[in-house]
Amino acid sequence: MKYDLVVVGGGPAGLAAAIEARKNGVERIVLIERDRELGGILQQCIHNGFGLHVFGEQLTGPEYAERFINELNNLKIEYLTNTMVLEINDKKEVYILNQELGFRRIEAKAIILSMGCRERTRGAIGIPGFRPAGIFTAGTAQRFINIEGYMVGKKVVILGSGDIGLIMARRLTLEGAKVLAVVELMPYSTGLTRNIVQCLHDYNIPLFFEHTVIDIKGKNRVEGVTIAKVDNNRVPIRGTEVFYECDTLLLSVGLIPENELSRNAGIEIDARTSGPFVNESMETSIEGIFACGNVVHVHDLVDFVTQEAQRAGRGAARYIKGEAIDNGVVIRTVNGNGIRYIVPQKLRLENLNDEINLFMRVDNIYNNCRLDVKLDGKIIKSFKKRKVTPGEMETVKLKKSDLSTYNDCSLSIEVVKE
């Protein structure tokens, strides 16, 4: 099997990337999805709030996915569902397996990786105790309720204030469960402010910062959990324990970009994002292999995933047509004070169009501050911010003319308190 472009993953990133590549002249495209249908995680996100940036209106997850699936079909882009990608390599060979085709090798001119991310589990955070029924990751509970039609519990405690956990607090309440508390280890939420207001405050669900679950009672089914306040080193403080009688514990404790295929192919991974290093076109360290969406870094809005995936689609099209320039001026992005990471990590100046969006997260809550953008130490732009938090991704848009230089150099961004 031979294609110009293979897209791995049929969620919002893969759909947008494949569509954008076709619009930029790539003919033979195949999109590969391991699930039984396209759309990815959007299919179980039945709440609204999707599409404000891309479409200027509020859509549910399935509605947002449907628009891209329809466009994919209208553009007659080929796709395979129920198909597992077993391996990719630096020769741009893709090995797949499904019930109809069996084991196949695909030769591609370019590959776009858009496998998304997965949830951290109880094992990843090391909660001690037995393994009773009633402990779910928030995304698993969301799938059970919204797609499979099963209720996961009646009295619930949620550990972690990520967006999926916050949304599930509201969802469980609407389905008749009692959400007793949301417990967050950090002194700030890792979810969007709008979700704290709409999913917790509107339903009088308490949120405890600097607390964690230290014990789970029950052998066959969860009977209750004990939470405690933690100190500055995240160690539980004796005497602060509180027991909640409940039958369910949801874990919303972070997401991990799914990069097993990337690592096995030899793609360089950024330890700060757990995703590949990418350039302005979302190309990884292996020429002709691109990545986008949550497999690169975890986003908080699907609209940003779409925009980033469209950039990958355009980049792959430019590469396939031999239009990418790889020997010009290179600008490397560097984290300044208060910045946890910046994506992309490398900009090839000659490949930029009119402007570039840089995505980043800060390392703490900062009020009344600004983001200073420096090119080789000289401030070229400043953006005032009333408040920035780790739970909300920041974007900085720069024009190509802002970056005019004749030499390779570095671009840093830092948080400055005012």
Image (cartoon, grey):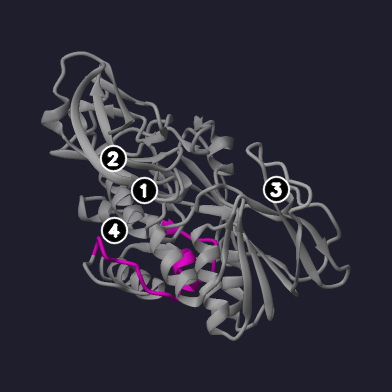
Q: Earlier in the sequence, mark 4 or mark 2?
A: 4
What kind of residue is marked 2?
Ile
Residue shown at the point (49%, 70%) measured from the top left: 200
What kind of residue is marked 4?
Ile
Task: Give the secondary structure at mark 4.
Answer: helix
**How far separated are the C-alphas under marks 4 and 2?**
15 Å
Residue shown at the point (37%, 74%) measured from the top left: 48
* 267 w.r.t. 101: above or below: above
**How far separated are the C-alphas under marks 4 and 1?**
11 Å
Q: Residue furthest bottom?
A: 176
Whether the residues at callouts 1 and 3 have beta carbons within 8 Å, the answer is: no
Q: Residue furthest right?
A: 219
Residue shown at the point (85%, 56%) measured from the top left: 129
Q: Position of residue 94 (x, y in %)?
A: 50, 45
Q: Earlier in the sequence, mark 2 or mark 1?
A: 1
What kind of residue is marked 1?
Leu
Task: Give the secondary structure at mark 1.
Answer: strand
Name the front one of labels 2 and 3: 3
Residue shown at the point (62%, 67%) measured from the top left: 181
Neighbor class of circle 4 (other Cα within 10 Å; few <14, some 14-19, many 20+) is: many
Say which residue label 3 marks. 125
Neighbor class of circle 2 (other Cα within 10 Å; few <14, some 14-19, many 20+) is: some
Say which residue label 1 marks. 5
Q: Position of residue 288 (x, y in %)?
A: 37, 36
* 271 w.r.t. 16: above or below: above
Does residue 37 belong to the magenta stretch?
yes
Say which residue label 4 marks. 19
Q: Which residues are magenta?
A: 31-54
Neighbor class of circle 3 (other Cα within 10 Å; few <14, some 14-19, many 20+) is: few
